[in-house]
Image (spheres, grey):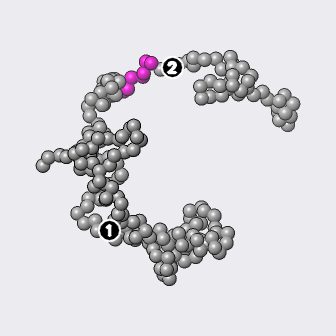
Amino acid sequence: MDRVPIRRIIFGTSYRGPDIKSGRIQTSSRIESMLSRPSWSVRSLLPKDEDTSQASVTKEQLHHLLKLSALPQPKSVEEEAGMLKTLESQIHFVKQIQKVDTTGVEPLVAIRDETAEAIQEQTITLEKLKPYLDQEEKVGNNGTIRRRKPTDMITESGWDPFELGDGKETRKKGKYFFVKKEKDRQSAAAISTP
């Protein structure tokens, strides 16, 4: 089976790219005809307005859910009715999604890129572990493996915090601020005397 680029399927063989001079994008007539007539709408998954007779969530359950979620209780009857209506439409939407036939579809373990390239990129190989294995050495009679301490550690800070001035802008050092603070001698004396 030959692999056909997606551009050829969507745009046909005569895809020229966007027309930069006029600011318009040239699309094929096949795409325009397909997009001119919508074949499906999300509204089909939402309940009809007249279908409010069967309420699956009671007011007590709504209050309990709000309490469990640490959300504020409704302030008025209208707000409570709006919350119930929204919750009913969400439940109806989930039920419609659950009706979709998924036979033969492998379930997702997680939402992630499962292409061969992504799996190869995420696979831990000996080459990826080599820098870490090079830091290990055997110590003692039993050959206990220990990691060497890095030699490129910074032991001293490269700046003097007291060189910073009094102004707000001059006290900035990177993403940090230096704050000069001095205890009031009278309040310190009052605290220290029993």
Q: Which residue is the site of mark 1? A: 100
* Circle number at residue 77: none
Pointer 1: residues within 10 angstroms few (<14), some, or many (20+)? few
Q: Nearer the viewer, residue 132 or 89?
A: 89
Q: Earlier in the sequence, mark 2 or mark 1?
A: 1
Residue at the far front in the pictured view: 22
The residue where tag 2 is placed is 154
- Give how far across and how far down residue 130 sits, in percent: 29, 27
| Rendering quarter of residue 183 | top right
User: Is residue 175 in sight in this rendering?
Assistant: yes
Q: In percent of the image, x 50 and y 82: which residue is there?
A: 53
Q: Is residue 193 visible?
A: no
Amino acid type of disc 1? Val
Q: Amino acid at mark 2?
A: Ile
Q: Can you say which quadrant of the picture contains the C terminus?
A: top right
Query: In the image as oriented, which residue stretches furthest toward the left?
Result: 1
Where 71 sits versus 113, above or below?
below
